[in-house]
């Protein structure tokens, strides 16, 4: 994590408009040195535009970009001590893996022997020793992604920008690369800024997450803070799955004011005649309307007698937990302390 009081990146009043469209709206943000920082949001939320503004591929309409205290707002990309890994990796097909990794060093005028040694060391750091003579077409998707990481880090940037680099990989490989990417970041100790629309990926990888919505940061915090204590209905529904009770439902069912959210895994389903417990002080009767088998867990949709549909997540610890329970009368039971009060859309 941070090794100095000066942030690696400081964005102040950062704004980018495209005609009548405001892609980034007066954004203020500090990202610490050595932090793995995720910018999470749906398409069009402004996260990729912010990444491009940091990289210098776009210039802001207003505001400033500072890199370790240095104002680089109007500097060209090559005059910023950052590097970018894209989703398509952008490797040169006619070059070997080693030549691809050494390319940035060659552009900087480094001698052949030194740049070859540094490129080989970079390949070793991403566990691709012995792959230097291959062409990109001879590699798997995960291997090409690691080559792109080696090429981006060999020039020792202070900040590495990653624009959905795992998006083209299949699920199994993406999960494997998430673990490897975090290990690489820790070993290098440099700041990673990671753009993704995948909330699970952001929760898995990052030290902190900025949840973007309509060009602004709706919430900023650690993965646990974002998931366990969402501040707005957008964050509660976008990051994971939540049951959202509007003001009317909250008052009628929960006896609470305002809008509230409840994660499906916080709910227990019990038989109608089950006695109440101190730990679960809210009990609502209903009928199982749908059962969705997810492998490790089962999602059940329960239509409460009051009319509201609630999502419940149960772990499949035994074969019986995944049985078809549609039409079964149940009690939805949870602790009121697991309810999270939500506010209107917010800017961090």
Image (cartoon, grey):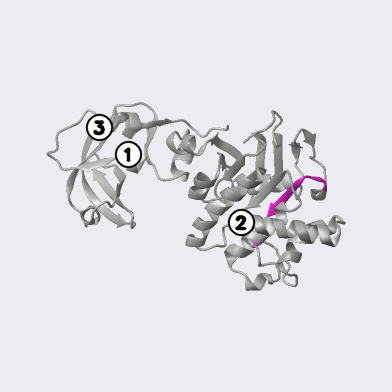
**Residue at the extreme left:** 273
Q: Residues within 10 Å of mark 2 (few under 14, many from 20)?
A: many
x 79%, y 35%: residue? 70
- Vertical placement of residue 186 versus 29, above or below: below
Q: Nearer the viewer, residue 257 or 174?
A: 174
* C-beta proximity under 8 Å, tags 2 and 3: no
Which x, y percent locates residue 136? 67, 69
- Binning the other alpha carbons within 10 Å of mark 3 as few (below 14), some (14 to 19) or many (20 upward) gives some
- Give the percent coordinates (x, y) of residue 215: 62, 41
Which residue does the numbered mark 2 point to in the structure image? Answer: 165
Secondary structure state at the residue bearing disc 3: loop
Question: Which circle's residue, 2 or 3, is located before the other in the chain?
Answer: 2
- Say left or right for 161 vs 310: right
Q: Which residue is mark 3?
A: 280
Q: Which of the two labelled residues, at mark 3 and mark 1, occupies the earlier sequence position?
A: 1
Q: Quadrant of residue 146?
A: bottom right
Residue in view at x 40 percent, y 45 percent? 241
Label 1 SS: helix
**Residue 167 location, quadrant:** bottom right
- The residue sitting at 80% across, 36% down in the picture is 71
Of pointers 2 and 1, the one earlier in the residue sequence: 2
Numbered badge on residue 170: none
Q: Which residue is mark 1?
A: 266
Could one spot residue 47 in this view of the protein? Answer: no
Q: Secondary structure at mark 2?
A: loop
Mark 2–mark 1 Cα distance, whole angstroms, equals 33 Å
- Point out the stretch of residues depicted in magenta: 79-88
Q: Position of residue 17 (x, y in %)?
A: 71, 44
Q: CA distance from mark 3 to mark 1?
A: 10 Å
């Amino acid at each position: 994590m941070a090794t100095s009081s000066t942030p690696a990146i400081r964005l102040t009043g950062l704004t980018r408009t495209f005609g009548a469209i405001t892609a980034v709206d007066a954004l203020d943000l500090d990202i610490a040195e050595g932090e793995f920082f995720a910018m999470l949001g749906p398409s069009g939320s402004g996260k990729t535009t912010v990444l491009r503004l940091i990289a210098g591929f776009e210039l802001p309409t207003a505001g400033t970009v500072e890199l370790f205290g240095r104002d680089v707002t109007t500097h060209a990309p090559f005059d910023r001590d950052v590097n970018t890994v894209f989703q398509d990796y952008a490797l040169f097909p006619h070059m070997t893996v080693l030549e691809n990794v050494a390319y940035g060093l060659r552009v900087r005028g480094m001698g052949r022997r030194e740049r070859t040694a540094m490129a080989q060391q970079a390949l070793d750091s991403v566990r691709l020793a012995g792959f230097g003579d291959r062409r990109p077409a001879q590699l798997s998707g995960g291997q090409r992604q690691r080559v792109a990481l080696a090429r981006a880090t060999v020039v020792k940037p202070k900040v590495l920008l990653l624009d959905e680099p795992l998006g083209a990989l299949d699920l199994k490989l993406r999960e494997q690369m998430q673990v490897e990417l975090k290990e690489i970041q820790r070993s290098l100790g440099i700041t990673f800024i990671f753009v993704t629309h995948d909330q699970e990926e952001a929760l898995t990888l990052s030290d902190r997450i900025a949840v973007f919505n309509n060009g602004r940061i709706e919430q900023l915090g650690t993965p646990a803070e974002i998931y366990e204590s969402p501040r707005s209905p957008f964050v509660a529904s976008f990051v994971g799955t939540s049951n959202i009770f509007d003001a009317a439902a909250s008052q009628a069912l929960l006896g609470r004011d305002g809008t509230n959210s409840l994660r499906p895994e916080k709910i227990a389903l019990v038989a109608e005649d089950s006695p109440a417990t101190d730990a679960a002080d809210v009990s609502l009767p209903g009928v199982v309307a749908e059962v969705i088998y997810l492998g490790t867990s089962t999602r059940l949709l329960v239509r409460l007698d009051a009319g509201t549909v609630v999502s419940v997540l149960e772990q499949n610890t035994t074969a019986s937990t995944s049985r078809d329970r549609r039409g079964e009368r149940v009690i939805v039971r949870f602790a009121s302390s697991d309810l999270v009060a939500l506010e209107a859309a917010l800017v961090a």
